Amino acid sequence: MDFILESKDLADYLMPIDTLIDFNHPLVRAKILEIEGKAITLEERARLAFEIARDDIQHSFDDHPTDEIAISASDTLASCEGICFAKAHLLAALLRGMGIPTGFCYQRVMKKDTPASGFALHGLNAIYLSHEKGWFRVDPRGNNAKVKTTFNMEQEDLAYSIRPGLGEIDYPTIYVRPLPSVVKAMEQSPNSEALFDNRPENI
């Protein structure tokens, strides 16, 4: 895919964002120090951060319903639970806090594998480790019986294979900050069941 950068300034993909991508929060800083203590290279640190967001945070739609919607990176880390957007917020905070440019990407997917079930956005991340490698996407959604994702710089290994013929869309833009419509849906949903239905359908 040919990506479209919301900003051509890499520094924009390193910034904290309000209280969402709060990599200066003590909980997030502690996790960053843990990662830096275990991994030396930027690639190793990015991979470990991805695995933490993917594996240590339970996905709220995978038999882990909750009445507390984690939105910020720190809240997601504290609760060890969140949907794809929350996991993407956490991964971005961990990586940006280690000086690794990270953005936000979105896909339009079917809610329950049929067009009749409706559509919703799915959130993931794009990472920039070097000029040679350029940007590549990773999906920290979390594995289950149907989803298996890995950290792969050479070939994308994402949660969903997009089917344009069924109305699904793979958006090429790498955003500096999470979409306001996504954050609003999370803020206005009283629980994960409501959030399943309240997610935006498209960009």
Image (tube, grey):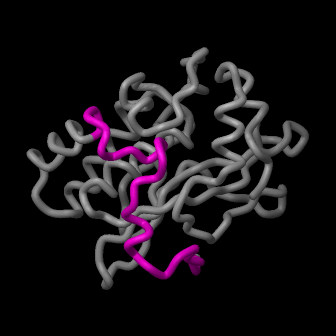
Please indicate whether residue 70 sits to the left or right of residue 33 in the image: right
How many labels, in total? 0
Does the magenta stretch mainly form a helix, a strand or a loop? loop
From the image, which quarter does the C terminus lie in? bottom right
Residue 145 in view, yes or no: no
- Where residue 9 appears, as percent x and y from the top left, is 44, 79
Question: Residue 10: horizontal and vertical position, in percent?
Answer: 40, 75
Toward the viewer: 29 or 135? 29
Q: Is residue 138 left or right of residue 35?
A: right
Q: Which residues are magenta?
A: 2-28
Question: Residue 26: within the magenta?
Answer: yes
Name the side, left or right, on which 157 lies relative to 190.
Answer: left
Looking at the rendered image, the quarter that the N terminus falls into is bottom right
Toward which corner of the image does residue 69 lie, by quadrant? top right
- Residue lying at the far bottom in this picture: please name it: 132
**Residue shown at the point (23%, 38%) measured from the top left:** 31
Residue 99 quadrant:
bottom left
